[in-house]
Image: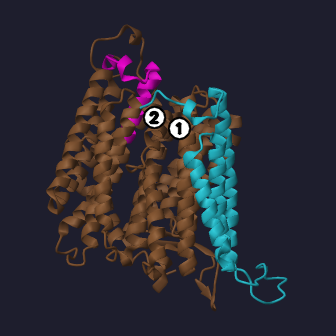
Chain colours: A brown, B cyan
Amino acid sequence: MSFLDQLIIHGPALLIALPLLGAFLTPLIGRVNDKLRNLFVIIILGITAILILLLAQEIFASGPITYVFGSTAPYVGKETVIRILFEIDALSIFMAMIGIILSFAAAIYSWAFMEKNTGLDKYYALLLLLTVGMLGMVLTGDMFNFFVFLEITSISSCALIAYYVNKAKSVEAGFKYIVVSTIGALFVLMAIALLYGQYDALNIAKLADSITFSFVDKIALVLLLAALAMKGGIVPMHMWLPDAYSRAPASVSLVLIGTTQAGLYGVFRVLFTLYGNVIELPTISMGWILVILGLLTMLVGVIMAMIQVDFKRLIAYGAVAELGYMFLGVGTCLTVLANPEVTLAQAPFAFEALKGGLFHVFNDALDVGLLFMVAGAVYYATKQTSLNSLGGLARNMKYTTVFFIIGLLAVSGVPPMNGFASKLLIYESTYQLNPILSIVAILASIMLLAIFVKVFHAAFLGPALPQFEKVKEVPKSMLIAMGIIAAFIVLFGLFPDLIVNTIVDPAANALIDNTGYLQWLTGGA
Amino acid sequence: MIANIPYLAVVGLIVIGLSAVLFRKNIIKMIIGITLIEAGVNLFLITLGYREGSIAPIWTSSPGGVMAYPVPQALTLTSIVIGVAVTALMLSLAIHIYRHHGTLDVRKIGGDDQ
């Protein structure tokens, strides 16, 4: 067996072990040399990214991977044995790709962006821990394990949001976030206990197989959805998100997008896999709840974004609006799945909507991530965050301006950027469910364009201001990080078919058809 | 009836904790509320694994008889450890908030944000 095969077989464990051990080595290496530490973090994340690519190749070729920690057989005699499963299907690896791209870009971006701050050893350790939590949430096949990784993500991201402890607002944002996310995580734990008490199992596949949708299951579903949608920043549970995103350092906001989407992954996994076998039972369709939440999220996001004057806070509300599109796409698919009179083959738009929703998860991470990095670059160069005091920056920061234009076009769904590709899929498919849905979606996109054009004018155009005469272009590491994300945006925009067919399509299939996820019950592993 | 008392205690703890988080204005009291919710959830997990007249689940020196279920105890232990970390982090943030504002009353903190 070659080294590469071994690497793929133990890939799931290494994906967690590598950044986790790296996180605790980082402060030690930081004692030796600062540059060495930065390089070490980037290399760790790079190796993790390569591992994810290897695993992705394996999964797209030959189906889900189950990795077992502990006993190899699920039962010895009649006793259940202690073991934890990692179940990685196309959706998990799809989310892992998003997470690692964002973390990798954030680590490169931090090199120059955070250089002048103190406490960087801890900063980098927390950044790696946050990555571990994010990857763990999407890779695990065990409910309690999911809770543990959820808490790792909460704790490390809270500490990073409150990184600027000398600023009162950052500390308040951090406190708000930890209160909200801890209560959410405790709700998740309560739901896990409710499910465990009934079915004597913590494994998602085992639970999905035996779930009956009793009254207690309904309570568990409500608790899980409320808590995970809160982690995902869906209106009306979005109030922590603008504070957290805008008060954290820009590189942290970038990774926070990944954690938000790990929360959304939880919502999708709960609805499609955990409750997948009983999806037709709810009398009030979960799909419509998701669609309505999606529409609300879009509208509240754009309306709140319009009145903001703080650069990062405005982008944060734009990010809230973008989250609505994913819920809209996935919810549209659920309405069809939950309707016993229509099969999926009769309504092909449902699958398109799901693909659009998932593709938009990836695109949103890239678009909003790029905008946050640009906002961070503007802050780095000018030390200003208010749009009222910015202006004429295109004269001195030409690369940053180009990146902002790319991000602006992508986030508001203008061709040929990637936002257009996924939004078009969502418009086309939701129109067939109800025309009003796509009208609201298009309206929100137009408003996003208007908002970001306003920002572009306020920050980059206009006469040269005397106080910004000495402003220089940001350092290379920040430009490289922005360049990586911008390259992905343009690539996805120019060849959407390639991306949709190779990675989005398997992920959407994995959600709809959960037999692959349940495979170990009937034989495998 | 007597067997249901732990469940009533769970509901009581969670309701008291939630109301403290929602209605108390002092940050320390909010943190106490969160630890109460946590205690409620932990108690729920432990109660799930308990069987009447059972003994601690230690295989090696078992005198025989019914054992309590070990998995919820393992889960609770993990949850307690996580809870300590979260509480410590929240208290350290409370210290920083106090340093900035000289008060822990949420009505006097913040303001100029929309």
- What residue sits 68% from the left and 42% below the top? B91
A379 drawn magenta: yes
Report the side of A159 relative to A243 (left or right): right
Residue type pointed to by label 1: Ala
Q: Is A311 situated above or below B31?
A: above
- What residue sits 25% from the left and 40% below the top? A412
- x and y percentages locating residue B83 in the rendered image: 66, 55
Is residue B111 something one can see in this rendering? yes
- What residue sits 28% from the left and 35% below the top? A408
A318 drawn magenta: no
Q: Quadrant of the N terminus of chain A?
A: bottom right
- x and y percentages locating residue A317 in the rendered image: 36, 39
Disc number placed over residue A246 in the picture, else none: 2
Give the crowd class for mark 2: few <14, some 14-19, many >=20 residues within 10 Å: many
* Disc 1: which residue: A173
Between A379 and B28, the one nearer to me in the picture: B28
Residue type pointed to by label 2: Ser
Which image quadrant is residue A280 in? bottom left
Asked if the residue at tag 2 contacts the one at tag 1, i.e. Cβ–Cβ closer than 8 Å, the answer is yes
Magenta residue span: A368-395
Name, please, the residue furthest toward the front: B1
CA distance for labels 1 and 2:
9 Å
